[in-house]
Amino acid sequence: MDKNYDHKKYEKDIYRKWEESGAFTPKIVKNKKPFTIILPPPNASGGMHTGNVLMIAIEDILIRWHRMKGDPTLWLPGTDHAGTETQITYERELKKEGKSRFQFDRKTLYKNIQEFVFKNKHFIEDQIRAMGASVDWTRYKFTLDEDVLETVRETFEKLHNEGLVYRDNYMVNYCPVCGTTYADIEVSHEEKNDPLYFMKYGSFTIATVRPESKFRDTALAVNPKDKRFKEWIGKTLEIPGLLGPIMMTVIPDPEVDPKFGTGIMKVTPAHDPHDFELGKKFNLPVLPIIDLDGRMDFSWFLNQENIDSKYRTRAEKYHKKKVREARKLMVEDLKEDGLLIKVDDAYSHPVPVCKAGHEIEPTVLPNWFIKVESLKKPALEAVKSGQIKIYPKWREITYIRWMESMHDWAISRQNVWGIRLPVWYSLEKNPTLQLTYLKTDGQRVLRSGQGVLSSKELDEARDGLQQLSAPIGSEYVISQTSPGSDYLQETDTFDTWFSSGQWPLVTLGYPDSNDFKYFYPTDVMETAWEILSKWVSRMIMFGIYLTGKVPFKDVYLHGIVRALDGRKMSKSLGNVINPEEYIEQYGVDALRIGLVSGTANGKDFNFPKDRVIAFRNFANKVWNIARFVNSVQGLASSVQTENEDDRLILNDLNKLIKDVDRLLEKFRFAEAGEKIYEFVWHKFADVYIEKYKNSKTQNFQTLNHVLVTSLKLLHPFMPFVTEAIWQEMKFDGQLITASWPIINDQK
Ligand SMILES: [Zn+2]
């Protein structure tokens, strides 16, 4: 054995041997209870981050522990197509070439993104291997594998047949730049400075940052307790404006803050989530003024007859301008009409932004929804009754609150990179469909269903289709394949969480494969606490809905790894830690157990660099213990009587086995690792071995037994160095499949 443990010499080789020996693939033994974890799939075209390493380290501890205990153990790997994220990344690549997604029909764009992902997929797969993850590669799944798509589409059909799917106009978080809607939980808020305009509104003054939406205001809201406006409630007023007068009713809204601005708010149901709800309550019309490209749309006005020429000129000036550009023009005109009272330039307010940082434009769009009431009840009950346990326990309340307040779920996204809804529209039957497509000459056109048929462009529309928007009430057919020659498929794709919510099912070949029958329900779902609401909740809902059984028994939520400076890692802060640099320098084992030991009770924690270094030193310590044992092997005397030191160390070893089992049962990984570290370094090496060196009644059998048992206990935490020692010492077989230590009561 070399003087020091050189991780670079062993890691790749050992992993290859494990994989080739079939150690990762469990044998289905009918009367034996299996142990199963499904790996939360990382982004197929992304790279490993420290959070992934922590996840793999924790899951691998559980997996290796159970495998050594003799359970048929399955850890199923996969990668995620990561719809929105990947499409944004790909579009950034396109931009570098001076192109945009609008130059491609959706079929071609999908194919191109697929190529991009497949070209990059091996990076993450190689990284999973480099982490030492003992996953069963023979069962590898990608979220867009054909059998996954089939199951996801069938689930949609089942939900639809049972009346749990509907279409509705809905206020969505729409990003005009990304061209898609985002779920509430995907939207973050940034504090921004925008001028606050005080405008004359008939006999009132209102304050707003969005004067451009005023043309489609349908009411004025006041706090019912505000004495100043009490007498106006219920009255309809004629308000002069930039394009002539508008009729508006004053309505009561307890959420209006009498102290904000002037205490009177304009209500725009088409472009504000709160106003949308208010509009439903008071039956206000929903009148959009911003189109899907984020431009002002004044067609509703310009299509009228006999418009005052001054107003027509204005409307034409604003029409199809980007919102902020149009706002400037309007403010000029407000000044000209004497309607602008003052501007507060120091006004700061939270603005919703999408994943890519663009401003969200709240917009009303037809969307697909799932009624969640009947799905969430059993999912909530499963946790409340303890059928599913959440670790750490204090995270449970997040789940319960989320489930209790969950609204119907908008499952459609206007993305290309995803699973397309199996919904088909006949152009004959739906003349008002809106289709955007590229003609054979490359021209991008927007036509109605009727327009496509009368211009005989059905084939062009089908081949060049970019987006289809079907008004509420459109007739449709649900089918896995095209139901007829004049049918076009919905261009919306499923929300990522809709398909990944079925991950434990689709990975195991639901509904009737042998794997599914044997390994489902799985045992542990281990993931970052951040996606408890987004993902874990949906898996529980779908698991119970489709199989009547919970998808897993335990949920373990790990904390988020922050940067060395204690802040969230981010590219812009330049504090992102690349795990590969640490692996290169200190070895995978040190990084894995270092991260695991840094997290206590699932809380967020700073990247524990000192722990990583400490465990690199520990790897060397264990290596040197083994070298010592190796060196005295031949010298062992034939007299093998147990002395007091032997009894002490064996007693401590028994206690350690008991502790490690107990702590792992309770997902207390850091403490388990710490116990092994303490025992090996401070009891075995510092005390026992030191005494052994000077003892006349050395008992080699004990020395060897403690080493072997320590290696076994440490293996799930530091798989490479322990296996390397095992091989160097020529112990039987591979450590990965050796048997887990049991307490020897005789000693
Ligand atoms: Zn965006």
Image: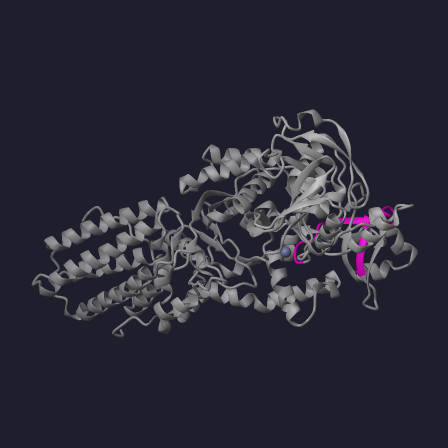
Q: Residue at x 34, y 63 (%)?
A: 590
Q: Residue at x 14, y 60 (%)?
A: 699
* Residue interval drawn in magenta: 417-437
- Residue 567 place in picture, x, y as percent: 42, 56
Quarter of the image where the N terminus is located = bottom left
Specify whether 729 is left or right of 649.
right
In the picture shown, does residue 543 fall above or below 572? Answer: above
Residue 426 highlighted magenta (yes or no): yes
Colour setting? one colour
Specify whether 620 is left or right of 584.
left
Quadrant of the rendered structure where residue 607 is? Answer: bottom left
Q: Nearer the viewer, residue 385 or 167?
A: 167
- Residue 453 place in picture, x, y as percent: 90, 55
The kind of secondary structure the magenta stretch mainly shows is loop
The number of discs equals 0
Instruction: Indicate the quadrant of ligand 1 in the picture.
Output: bottom right
Q: From this viewpoint, is residue 76 visible?
A: yes
- Residue 577 place in picture, x, y as percent: 43, 63
Q: Residue at x 80, y 60 (%)?
A: 437
